[in-house]
Image (cartoon, rainbow, N blue to C red):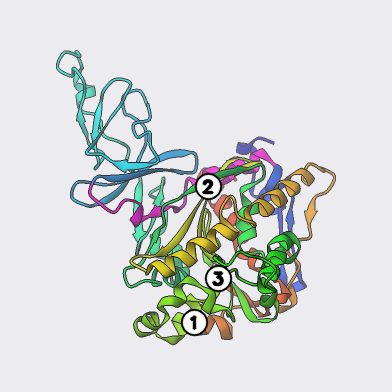
Amino acid sequence: MKANELKFSDIDRLIVDNVDQHEFWVHRDLYRDPAVFELEMKYIFERNWVFVGLESQAPNPNDYFTTWVGRQPIIVARDKHGKLGAFINSCAHKGARIAHHRDGNAKQWVCSYHGWAYDTAGACIYIKDQDAGCYAEPFNKLDHGLKKVKFDAYRGFLFASLSDDVPSLDEHLGDAKKMLDLVWDQGPDGIEAIPGVSSYTYNANWKMQVENCIDAYHLTSCHPSFMNIVSRRKAGESRNTQVKSIDFNVMDVVKGGTACFPRGHAVIYATNPLENERGMFVHRDEAVARCGETKTKWMLATRNLTIYPNVQFAENASLQMRVIRPLSVDKTEMTIYCIGAKGESDAAREIRIRQYEDFFNTSGLATPDDTIAYEDCQFGFQARNLEWLQGTARGITGYHTGPDELSQEIGIRPDSGFMGAMGAWDETVYYGGYRAWKQFIKDGLEADGLL
């Protein structure tokens, strides 16, 4: 089936949302059908707000970095006056890429093909040999600048959209902003990406990563090597004393919850009995004075947050930011960062980095485990005579709408959630993402008259 032939009924058939009867099922075609992938790119990644970076990645005038919105190459730049903006990374003349590096500082970009030049506000400031070019009036009336992209920020989190027909960023984020606050407020001046970015690809669908961040169920079966190493360190059987590893064996008995927000955002969280092992704990007293006991408690808690569709903040072993870039129905690029509070002490920064290297980094103990699991799933999706996954059933008898005791303590009012011992390994936290997935695609089909 071609992407432009998909109708509402085809999208509706892929998700069974019947929670009142304790049923919520997801069809395997969400992960394996190229036609579905085309709709996702068009209506979720290219007609929606997409995370593009942190303001700390371009702190000074004329700083820039390059990234993607869906399949479109993007430059995020701070102009000479310090104003941030976003542009398509394509010369107006012949379409060539003008910014070749991941990041840098430049007063202008010069196209290496024909020499057209642009400033960091996106304006075309030079057309080579324009006077001798025999150009006609219709050409002279054109805007020769870089194509601007809709751009906005929440605190230091930067977002862009290829479509102007989107709600405000404030509306898009909703109450999930309060979860971003728990990331940003870890320092009095916010957070920054610590140098040392890594990128890698895995051969599976992008939604495998979206789910994994809020999937606690896989922890004990997918990461036993890490848990065994932590046990050896605690028992004094390891000589590695530089890493304060997080012991996930204690997490299944602590109290926690999950929450789904409108437009696909979701979070899983738990109180942290090992908060003193965290880098931020070094500055706990300052955080309490600035933010209060309750907010500091939840900043030190275990939290994995997905801002739909493409960025995640994993706050368990250190603080990791993951940016998701779908390449095809069965291939995804990940870019990952260690995040820390601006101006934090060397002691706090060292703990963050060592824990990040130990668990999260591409060379860490967790990331290879996860990506192999995604690829095993994608391999199994080749079984076309199997239609439905059973990976959304855990926790459904504890599913509730609205806030609960823990979400109220945090200060959020989610659409739905689950509260209990973390050992329940709730899967209802996926529901908000699937519902947003279906609504974004159906809204796009309707807007394009493909009813």
Residue with the mark numbered 2: 43
- Residue 219: percent from left, percent from top: 70, 65
Residue with the mark numbered 1: 297
- Point out the frontmost of discs 2 and 3: 3
> Which span of residues is magenta-colored?
33-61
Mark 2, Cα crowd under 10 Å, few <14 / some 14-19 / many 20+, is many
Instruction: Please check the rendered image and state whether residue 288 is part of the magenta-colored stretch, yes or no.
Output: no
Earlier in the chain: of badge 2 and badge 3, it is 2
Q: Are marks 2 and 3 in contact (CB under 8 Å)?
A: no
Mark 1, Cα crowd under 10 Å, few <14 / some 14-19 / many 20+, is some
Q: Which mark is residue 270?
A: none
- Residue 166: percent from left, percent from top: 42, 54
Is residue 29 placed above or below 269 in the rendered structure? above
Q: To which quarter of the image does residue 260 belong?
A: bottom right
Pick the residue in front: 116 or 254: 254
Element class at badge 1: helix
- Residue 95: percent from left, percent from top: 37, 26
Earlier in the chain: of badge 1 and badge 2, it is 2
Pick the residue in front: 185 or 397: 185
Q: Amino acid at mark 1?
A: Lys
Q: Which mark is residue 303?
A: 3
Element class at badge 3: strand
User: Is 114 on the left or on the right of 387, as rendered?
Assistant: left
Q: Residue at x 43, y 76 (%)?
A: 282
Q: Amino acid at mark 2?
A: Tyr
Is residue 82 placed above or below 355 in the rendered structure? above
Q: Residue at x 35, y 85 (%)?
A: 289
Mark 1 to mark 2: distance in Å? Answer: 38 Å
Earlier in the chain: of badge 1 and badge 3, it is 1
